[in-house]
Amino acid sequence: MAVRPITVIGHRALHSPTKKVREVTDEIRTLVADMYDTMEAADGVGLAANQVGSRARLFVYDCPMPEGPNARGVVLNPVLERLGTPGPLGEEEDGEGCLSVPGEWFPLARHPRARVTGTDLDGNTVTIEGDGLLARCLQHETDHLDGYLYVDRLIGPVKTQAREAVKDRGWAADGILKWDPASTTADEV
Ligand code: ZN
């Protein structure tokens, strides 16, 4: 198992839809094991395969819950259902971040509840449903696999702020398309 570099906004893998996983090969198993390590090293709550440059439609998650242990696992070929109606935007409770836009946080109203259905590495059907942070995580990771970042969904002044922040960080201009959580923290990228 190994920590892999994480793609940064502007990297082509993040802006293209991923492809359905048709067979769980050794390569896929290694990818998933590495993604758990990478998510942990980067202190993330979720990681989509295109965040490590893969085109496989799968994500891992490790999401703190209000009570009890973290919700944790892998979903291949996830299908998302957004449930409920997004409320008015709350600057604090709606703050969202992404390991591919490292060190930045912007508020985004999400559906309060979400359900993802897919399969695990053994081909069993998995269904994850939740609200709060878990609902946000499920929507965020599925968006990744469809080729969208959360900053693509921002609206109003926050959208402009995010665009300027990304420009100021200079990642694309400086050719920084990946960062290595084994040697760097998100705030230092
Ligand atoms: Zn993300």
Image: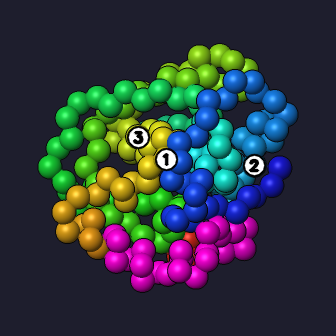
Q: Is residue 182 magenta?
A: yes
Which residue is at a point 36% across and 31% down the rendered structure image?
Answer: 114
Q: First in sequence: mark 3 or mark 2?
A: 2
Which residue is at a point 34% across and 77% down the rendered structure image?
Answer: 164
Q: Which residues are magenta?
A: 162-185
Quarter where residue 44 is shown: bottom right
Give how far across and how far down residue 92 sits, in percent: 26, 61
> Which amino acid, mark 3?
Gln
Give how far across and how far down residue 35 sits, in percent: 69, 48
- The residue that label 3 is drawn on is 139
> Which amino acid, mark 1?
Gly
The residues bearing labels 2 and 1 have C-alpha atoms spaced at a distance of 21 Å
- The residue that label 1 is drawn on is 147
Q: Secondary structure at mark 1?
A: loop
Q: Secondary structure at mark 2?
A: helix
Q: Quadrant of the C terminus?
A: bottom right
Give how far across and how far down residue 166 sits, in percent: 42, 74
Left or right placement of residue 27 versus residue 105 in this view: right
Which residue is at a point 69% across and 68% down the rendered structure image?
Answer: 180
Question: Alpha-carbon neighbours of circle 1 within 10 Å: few (<14), some, or many (≥20)?
Answer: some
Q: First in sequence: mark 2 or mark 1?
A: 2
Q: Is mark 3 within 8 Å of ligand 1?
A: no
Question: Alpha-carbon neighbours of circle 3 within 10 Å: few (<14), some, or many (≥20)?
Answer: many
Quarter where residue 19 is shown: top right
